[in-house]
Image (cartoon, helix red, strand yellow):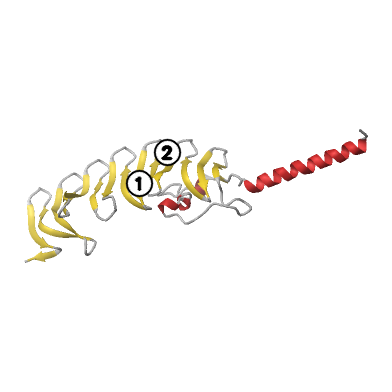
Amino acid sequence: MNLRRQIFIFILLLSFFNGVCQRFANQVPQAKRYTPQEITDPEYGIVIYNKMCAIIGGDSMRYSKDGYNVQGWMEDFYVSGKTLHKGFYVDGYIKIFKNYYENGQIERTFSSTDPRHSKIEIFYDDGKLKSKIEYFDGNPQNQYDFFKNGNPEYIEENDKDIEYLYKRNSFFETGNPESIFEMLDKKTKKYIKKEFTENGKLKEEGTMIFRKDLRDYQKDGVWNYYDTNGKILKTENYYKGELLL
């Protein structure tokens, strides 16, 4: 084979491989690189991927660089090269994913068991659980938040259709309750409500009911208010939110 023919074949092969590589690059979006500051919200963490979770109400899609909806597994990285995000995409929407702190700890995970149920778990940078949110039809059904010391911060549980609460409790970082709101009777939708001081002393307590017609919780029954020594300062009676004189 003469030299001219060898050069011609080499140019053909080079053009072929360049074309293949170009088509592959157009089909597979390139991984992105971020600094921690540009993708981390000081209060809520790495939330930029939540908007691509249609099952929890996200309305944004991820596209390849040539404008196609992303399909399959994708990874993003910090500028340092450490993994930031791993997610599985279908038609541009995330089905499951994990985010990571730059130190390698998982920042959050998202998963779904079926089209109506999904779950997000969020972690502190030392690996301790910060929050767990369970969704039904895109709406938070149950939520559990924790302080960094492991004590509960907030608990909310709803019925399966998210029409009314089972409980909504909050706590001080010491572990003492701050506010307790829990169902006493499922049939009548009656609740007990208590408020506490930070040192654990009861400030007020009483019963409430859920008014389905108003989609509201109203005082109904006896309410007691206490001083710092635990003695009753006053007592009030309510009926469907109205104070009885």
Could you tell me which residue is drawn at 28 percent across and 42 percent down?
152
Q: Does 237 sit left or right of 35 as displayed?
A: left
SS assignment at label 1: strand
Tell me which amino acid carries mark 2: Asp
Task: Residue at 71%, 43% (x, y): give it.
Answer: 20
Q: Name the amino acid type tagged 1.
A: Ile
Find residue 171 and report its horizontal and vertical position in percent. Answer: 25, 45
Asked whether residue 193 appears in the rendered view, the answer is: no
Classify 10 Å Cα crowding around label 1: few (below 14), some (14-19), many (20 and above): some
Give the image location of residue 150, x and y in percent: 31, 37
Work out whether residue 180 or residue 216 is closer to the camera in this orientation and state it: 216
Which of labels 2 and 1 is toward the front?
A: 1
Q: Residue 133 shows which numbered tag?
A: 1
Q: Indicate which disc residue 225 carries.
A: none
Say whether residue 45 is left or right of residue 192: right
- What is the tally of numbered marks visible in this picture? 2
Give whichever of discs 2 and 1 has the lower sequence position: 2
Please give the residue where the numbered disc 2 appears in the rendered image: 125
Q: Nearer the viewer, residue 180 or 37?
A: 180
Check the picture and name the quadrant holding the C terminus: bottom left
Left or right? Give the position of 3 relative to 45: right
